[in-house]
Image: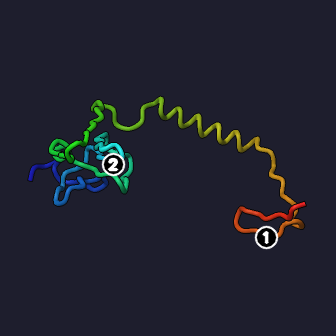
């Protein structure tokens, strides 16, 4: 066995049975479109996606009539770039500002309530 071909702790391995190579790409099937999509390795392991090593990505076969779409990425393009991180930071700041300036919630009078189940309330008609 060559060095570098065995999955190291903290990395995800190929989803194919008995393959011990590290996963480099993620395969997702879109059944409604008869399409198989191979893209960059997903950030988290998804239950309906398959993480594959390079060898199994290249050997992938699909049923007749299906299309394979391979999303190409550059080697240095691993993870979010600085624009993505700034967009997330701005969104978090906006949410924090909205919570800080939110008007206090007004409670409905409970005398008119007939029954309550979770967040739903039944009120008598007038």
Residue visible at 60% across and 40% down? 92
Q: Quadrant of residue 34?
A: top left
Marks 2 and 1: in contact by CB < 8 Å?
no
Camera-nearest residue between 31 and 102: 31
* Quadrant in which residue 91 is drawn: top right
Residue under numbered circle 2: 31
Front-most of residues 24 and 8: 24
Residue 86, relative to residue 99: is it above or below? above
The answer to which of marks 1 and 2 sits earlier in the sequence is 2
- Name the mark on residue 106: none
Q: Nearer the viewer, mark 1 or mark 2?
A: 2
Image position of 18 with respect to 42: above or below: below
Quarter in which the C terminus is drawn:
bottom right
Please tell me whether mark 1 sits on a helix, a strand or a loop: strand
Residue 117: % across, % down: 72, 68
The residue at 31%/48% (across/down) is 29
Q: Cα distance, mark 1 to mark 2?
A: 44 Å
Query: Label 1 belongs to which residue?
Result: 115
- Residue 110 at x, y = what percent? 86, 65
Q: Secondary structure at mark 2?
A: helix
Q: Quadrant of residue 74?
A: top left
């Amino acid at each position: 066995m060559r060095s570098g071909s065995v999955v190291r702790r903290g990395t995800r391995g190929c989803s194919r049975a008995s393959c011990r190579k590290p996963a480099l790409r993620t395969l997702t099937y879109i059944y409604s479109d008869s399409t198989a999509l191979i893209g960059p390795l997903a950030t988290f392991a998804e239950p309906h996606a398959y993480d594959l090593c390079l060898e199994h990505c290249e050997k992938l076969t699909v049923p007749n009539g299906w299309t394979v779409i391979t999303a190409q990425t550059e080697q240095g393009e691993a993870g979010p770039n600085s624009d993505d991180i700034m967009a997330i930071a701005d969104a978090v700041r906006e949410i924090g500002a909205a919570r800080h300036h939110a008007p206090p919630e007004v409670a409905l009078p409970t005398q008119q309530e007939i029954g309550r189940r979770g967040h739903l309330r039944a009120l008598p008609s007038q």
